[in-house]
Amino acid sequence: MVIVGEKINTSRKSIAEAVEAQDVDFISEAARTQAEAGAHYIDVNAGTFLDKEVDYLCWLVEVVQNAVDLPLCLDSPNPKALAEAIKHHRGEPMINSISLEKERLRALLPVVTSQPCSVIALCMAETSMPSTVEERVEVGAEIIRRLTREGIPLEKIYVDPLVQPVSVDTRMGTAVLGGMNQIMNGFPGVNTICGLSNISFGLPLRSLINRHFLALCMAQGLSAAILDPTDKQLMATLLSVELLLDRDEYCGNFIEAYHDGRIGASS
Amino acid sequence: MVIVGEKINTSRKSIAEAVEAQDVDFISEAARTQAEAGAHYIDVNAGTFLDKEVDYLCWLVEVVQNAVDLPLCLDSPNPKALAEAIKHHRGEPMINSISLEKERLRALLPVVTSQPCSVIALCMAETSMPSTVEERVEVGAEIIRRLTREGIPLEKIYVDPLVQPVSVDTRMGTAVLGGMNQIMNGFPGVNTICGLSNISFGLPLRSLINRHFLALCMAQGLSAAILDPTDKQLMATLLSVELLLDRDEYCGNFIEAYHDGRIGASS
């Protein structure tokens, strides 16, 4: 499982303050704790700053890559910010995200083909959010075709089936799980990724629901998740499921993480 | 999901003491708390008492069925104890368990065909514990054929794929999950059941591993589980996974259990 650490996002108050204050130490520490907790990519998002987003995102890229020896997940709704940030990045970043929305696709295709990178491809068409498994598969297949036609290999594509709240429609869990399964079977080698927290919107015990959703996604073959790797309960879910699915030789990762205090549970 | 409450087992010290003292109140309370927590069957097991097992098991049947209006899961390694206990049971019990071991099969077939009941069928052949998916499927298929040939309908059979520790062999999780999946696909209508705790033997954070194993089994279609329904974290797993798999209309069971204090999490 590829872990994308989600914490450096200016929608979080402490991060927004640190970015405005250009607090290198605070951001570096937020990067290091995620790296030590097991992140493979560090997500950086300054999307709340609108006018200053481009400058701030580029600054984050520099600061975070000085702090940790990891690739970043460049995260923005703004193609211009991604186009600038990728120039500051050393190595192969992950671009978060492209979709079938026309403007976005047109602006980002030149960016993601300008240098080697991985791409998060949202199952989002021009007009609406996907609802059913079928809609996710249809939009996912189309965006995969568009990206591979531009020369991006399947292995660099991370399809995000778009998680929506089960409190709004109880079919939203199975729509993601089924979509994920069909997309991975239909395009062997392609990756899948998702965020977790939308699934539990409007319900009690949200972290618990998110953890179990991660477990179910992993059973379908989820390749990567955007999450907080310093959340010891969530990481306990991730490592115990890898263990149960025979992806942890000699139970080594699980036992080591337990002894290092990186995973925990309340009982 | 059919929940079989596992707590009335004389391998637990407090239950053994209560059974020896013929403490009707203690046993009745252990039955009622499980029923209130959501059990559909109450397991009764006096197997530690050897000589007195038959009497004690029959006594447990009377006491528990006086306390709660639920069918019981009559649980013994001893066919004679099961043959006697079933005579004391009102309604349709679940018999725990039959297997392909010759003596056991010969002794129990007349019992399970003597009156309507459900039967737990262990994937256990004469000679050895199953190891691979294939062995589970082979033994499971054979025992299903033996039971249906005696007139027991598929819907009354609960196949137990036999959970063994991943600490001994990391393939043991996927062997159960794969076996469960293939048996249910091969015999549509048949049920599956399992205990959870063996999976985590020898590892830290056992309850956590057990909970995630339950989640993965449920994703494969597990019909029933033998567990402690008063364990609020385990029940939180069960109800959140039912919710995520679209088996909880309007999220009603989950929200109600939360408000009743029947489920919980540490964060």
Image (tube, coloured by chain):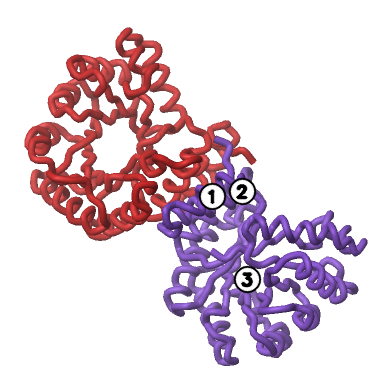
Chain colours: A red, B purple
In the image shown, does B163 or B230 lie closer to the viewer? Answer: B230
Q: Is residue A131 left or right of residue A101?
A: right
Tell me which label, 3 or 1, sits earlier in the chain. 3
Relative vertical location of residue A4 with respect to residue B52 in this rendering, above or below: above
In the image, what residue occupies the spot 38% across and 22% down?
Answer: A31
Q: Residues within 10 Å of mark 1 (few under 14, many from 20)?
A: few
Q: Is residue A56 left or right of residue B166?
A: left
In the image shown, does A175 or A114 lie closer to the viewer? Answer: A175
Which amino acid, by three-letter code, is at mark 2?
Arg
Image coords of residue B210 (percent x, y): 59, 52
Q: Label 1 to label 2, Cα distance in Å? A: 9 Å
User: Which numbered marker is on residue B256?
Assistant: 1
Q: Secondary structure at mark 3?
A: loop
Q: Are marks 3 and 1 on the same chain?
A: yes
- The chain holding disc 2 is B
- The chain holding disc 3 is B
Q: Secondary structure at mark 2?
A: loop
In the image shown, does B93 or A263 lie closer to the viewer? Answer: B93
Tell me which label, 1 or 2, sits earlier in the chain. 1
Q: Label 2 to label 3, Cα distance in Å? A: 36 Å
Q: Residues within 10 Å of mark 3 (few under 14, many from 20)?
A: some
Which amino acid, by three-letter code, is at mark 3?
Met
User: Which numbered marker is on residue B129?
Assistant: 3
Which residue extends farthest top? Answer: A21
Image coords of residue B184 (percent x, y): 46, 73
- The chain holding disc 1 is B
Q: Quadrant of residue A228?
A: top left
Given contact means CB atoms under 8 Å apart, are the residues at marks 1 and 2 in contact?
no
- Which image quarter is the C terminus of chain B in? top right
- Between disc 3 and disc 1, the foreground one is 1
Which residue position is annotated with label 2? B262
